[in-house]
Image: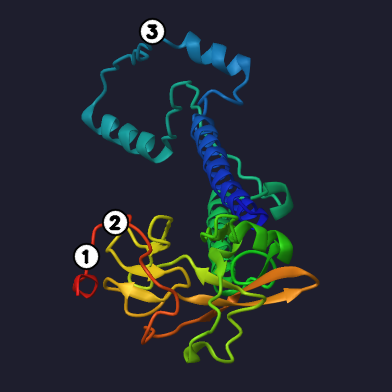
Amino acid sequence: MSFGNLVLVGVALFAILGAVGAFTIAFRRSQSDESAEVVDPTAGVSSETLQADKSMVGVRVEPIPVPVVEESVDEIEVEVEVEVAEAEPEPSPVAIQVVETQRVVEVSPEEAGVTRRQFFNRALNVTFFSFLGIMGINSLAFFWPRLSGGFGSDIDAGSLAEVKSAVFTPSGSILPLFIPEAKAYVVPAPTSLSDQYAGKQVETDGLMALFQRCVHLGCRVPWCAPSQGFECPCHGSKYNSVGEYFAGPAPRNLDRFVVEVRDGRFIIKTGSVIQTSRAPSLTVSYPQGPSCIAATSGDEEA
């Protein structure tokens, strides 16, 4: 995994942990707010008031007896009128009434801090924009060309002498040298190239570099030592040692790369892929022995 991928994974984990932490803090604050809403109705009442209130529990207040005086009807009516005119409101029974009050104190925004709504909004914004940032970085990494190193750039396959000693065996048979970084086979070039390769720089110092991918559906084409050619195990396409089409559903020859020798090093330019049609005639005979896969094309049977 490259450094860029590690950075992307780290940013994603940071965003996820931030969202989880935000949810946990908000949940705890909501629990504390709910517990704080329970108010004691006797809060703020003095102890003397509480004792006086408890002393009235179970006490029965008897009405004051009023003596009855026999008087004439006229005198009673006059006294009643006078009493009604001069009557004063009777005092209410002695009792204590507890009034609950809520004190509201305004605080400044600095003292109040961040509300739950603000916290959730900010957490969602951070998560959303982090996701957009990761998507943007991935998009740039996908569309941005790799200017140095890796497939798509110039690959150093090694010194020219070492490559030739690996490709040309003492027995005279061909053993292609596979370069994983370039996804290419280095093979000996034919003594005379076909006209379709003229001016395309696909050969240097007797060597060529073939793309490992089958031109039919993209399977990797392995080397078959008995037949001295490349044979695709997926659908049976076959090519000779220099990648020229021989049989199968493949529409053309194997693709190849532009190559050069630079300071005694064999360089494969994987950013320059050369495509050619089927050769009218093979420049290298094939097969030179038994095939590694069964024949799947009528061209080979013919």
According to the picture, the residue beneath numbered tag 1 turns out to be 296
Label 1, label 2: how many angstroms apart (C-alpha)?
9 Å
Q: Residue at x 53, y 42 (%)?
A: 20
According to the picture, the residue beneath numbered tag 3 turns out to be 58
Work out whether residue 203 or residue 215 is closer to the camera in this orientation and state it.
203
Q: Residue at x 58, y 25 (%)?
A: 43
Classify 10 Å Cα crowding around label 3: few (below 14), some (14-19), many (20 and above): few
Q: Residue at x 51, y 76 (%)?
A: 256
Work out whether residue 226 or residue 230 is closer to the camera in this orientation and state it.
226
Disc 1, SS = loop
According to the picture, the residue beneath numbered tag 2 turns out to be 293
x, y (%) of residue 299?
Answer: 23, 75
Q: Amino acid at mark 3?
A: Gly
Label 3, label 2: how many angstroms apart (C-alpha)?
108 Å
x, y (%) of residue 216?
Answer: 33, 72
Q: Nearer the viewer, mark 3 or mark 1?
A: 1
| Label 1 close to label 2 by CB (< 8 Å) | yes
Classify the position of the C terminus by image quarter.
bottom left
Q: Amino acid at mark 1?
A: Thr
Label 3, label 1: how many angstroms apart (C-alpha)?
109 Å
Work out whether residue 267 or residue 28 is closer to the camera in this orientation and state it.
267
In the image as oriented, which residue stretches furthest toward the front?
171
Q: Amino acid at mark 2?
A: Ile
Q: Is residue 71 above or below residue 22?
A: above
Classify 10 Å Cα crowding around label 1: few (below 14), some (14-19), many (20 and above): some
Picture quadrant where residue 228 is located? bottom left
Classify 10 Å Cα crowding around label 2: few (below 14), some (14-19), many (20 and above): some
| Label 3 close to label 2 by CB (< 8 Å) | no
> Considering only order in the chain, which callout, 1 or 3, is on the residue closer to the N terminus?
3
Q: Nearer the viewer, mark 3 or mark 2?
A: 2
